[in-house]
Image (cartoon, rainbow, N blue to C red):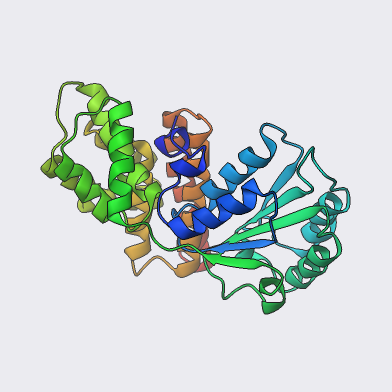
Amino acid sequence: MQLAEKYRPKTFDDLIGNKEIIAELKLMTEQKSLPHLLLTGPPGTGKTSAIGVMRQTLYGNNRFASKEINASTDNGIDVIRTDVKDFATHASPQGNVPFKLLILEESDELTSKAQPALRRIMELYSKHCRFILTGNKDKSIIDAVKDRTHWLQFIKITPEDIFPRLKMIFEKEHVLITDKAIKYISEKSDGSMRNALNKFGETIRSKSNKRPNIEITLSMVQQIKLNLKRGNDILKKALNHNLLEARELIFNEQKTGLTTKLILNQICEVAYTWDVVKELMKADIAELNLEMELALLQGAEEVSVITAFIGTISKIGKKWRKKNGKD
């Protein structure tokens, strides 16, 4: 299991950073007195984890007491008029909790037509349905929706808060690692626990599993990245239909201890820096990266994910060459 999922917080005490916000959410949850909530802030700062703890505290394993919709994919007015309205209309008390919970992740992606419809539903069905909206940016959410929520802004987690959590995780995973190395990860994770685990933790665990008695040092952690030249080579070969060669280069990178997820992420980051790669083409690559991350998370074979990634990058290259009359 991916470390970010394996160690996803299960209680309020497990949540790190944003202490005042977490204390407020804990009090609301314990009193079973939630207003509609809007949680905004950078990725990896604990918004979704906090919601997960609230759901578990309120409803235990009752999966019918709450519903989650991701507005990055379902962001139109039809979703609001059907899925959201249907859930809110039939919401009812759940045991000693007087409401059901509808979570709308990435609500800043909702269309301009969908948001007024959402606002109306929030007003009509607030007695037995509470809404929790999340988003990275609040500017995309209309004032009429904001005004009907209690708005909490998450900030980046400090290295001082990330350090003890990382240390605990590495100890549980039986990874020998120096405090200097953990401190470096804490400082280089851009205030995101998810970054700390996905960009560093997975590769460190992989190295440790291959050599259980090795101690991970600061210099070893500083080298955890895809070589820029090799990243460029992989991307060029994939975009130009040299699929087998590109795949073999990724396999070689895996042998150095880098995780598949880190390699694919950093190949995409290389693409984002290329001037010859158009902005919409970069968007296609970013969407592909998310799909591959999800496939890995759901247990897909790494060889299949790598093959699909390289093949789709090749198709993206062909698509954009055709649009520019070069294919």
**Left or right: 142 with respect to 297?**
right
Specify whether residue 237 is in view.
yes
Specify whether residue 242 is in view.
no
Percent position (x, y) of residue 315?
A: 50, 50
Q: Toward the viewer: 250 or 215?
A: 215
Q: Toward the viewer: 299 or 170?
A: 170
Q: Toward the viewer: 44 or 220?
A: 44
**Left or right: 51 with respect to 62?**
left
Percent position (x, y) of residue 101?
A: 72, 49
In this rendering, the answer to whether 119 lies above or below 318 is: below
Residue for point 33% across, 65% down: 274
- Quadrant of the image occupied by residue 65: top right
Residue for point 79% across, 40% down: 94
In this rendering, the answer to whether 26 lies above or below 208 is: below
Q: Toward the viewer: 213 or 97?
A: 97
Percent position (x, y) of residue 60?
A: 66, 34
Residue for point 55% across, 65% down: 152
**Left or right: 58 with respect to 179?**
right
Percent position (x, y) of residue 96?
A: 77, 40
Please state, as top left, top right, bottom left or bottom right, where the N terminus lies in the image. top left
Residue for point 82% across, 49% down: 87
The single residue placed furthest to the bottom in the displayed view is: 143
Instruction: Count how many numbered circles sit on residues in the image.
Output: 0
